Image (cartoon, rainbow, N blue to C red):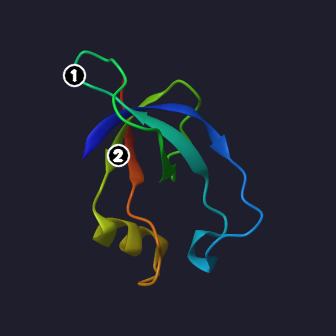
Amino acid sequence: MFIARIDGSITSTVKHKSLDGCSLLIAQRLNADGSATGEPQIVIDPMRSGRGARVLVSTDGDLARQMLRDKTTPTRLVVIGILD
């Protein structure tokens, strides 16, 4: 798990069938002091978080498969909470 800032959204014309109806967002991983680290990553967002929100991201592929109800989904990064 890690904390990230939502920097934008992704529009995909073609994606895996398990991701139909899912929001894809650009998430920038954050250090403990709030500074950005690493490259931005694409996450699945069932929480409907907005741009600039700080979120908790799970890196557990099993959780993504359970949430999407598809054992073949090609993702593992899922927003599981919005931080105050």
Q: Is residue 17 left or right of residue 77?
A: right
Question: Which numbered mark, 1 or 2, is in the foreground of this view?
Answer: 1
Judging from the image, what secondary structure is the residue with disc 1 in? loop
User: Which residue is farthest right?
Assistant: 13
> Disc 1 marks which amino acid?
Ala
Q: Amino acid at mark 2?
A: Val
Going from N to C along the chain, the mark reached first, 1 or 2, is: 1
Q: Residue at x 42, y 38 (%)?
A: 39
Q: Secondary structure at mark 2?
A: strand
Q: Is residue 17 left or right of residue 53?
A: right
The circle drawn on residue 22 is none
Residue at which label 2 appears: 57
In the image, residue 34 sits, relative to residue 80, either above or below, namely above
> Going 48% across and 27% down the picture, which residue do you hit?
53
Is 49 placed left or right of 9 in the picture?
Answer: left
Q: Position of residue 49 (x, y in %)?
A: 53, 37
For the view shown, which residue lies furthest in the front direction?
A: 39
Residue 32 has which mark?
Answer: 1
Quarter of the picture containing the C terminus is top left
Residue 67 at what x, y percent from top left? 42, 68
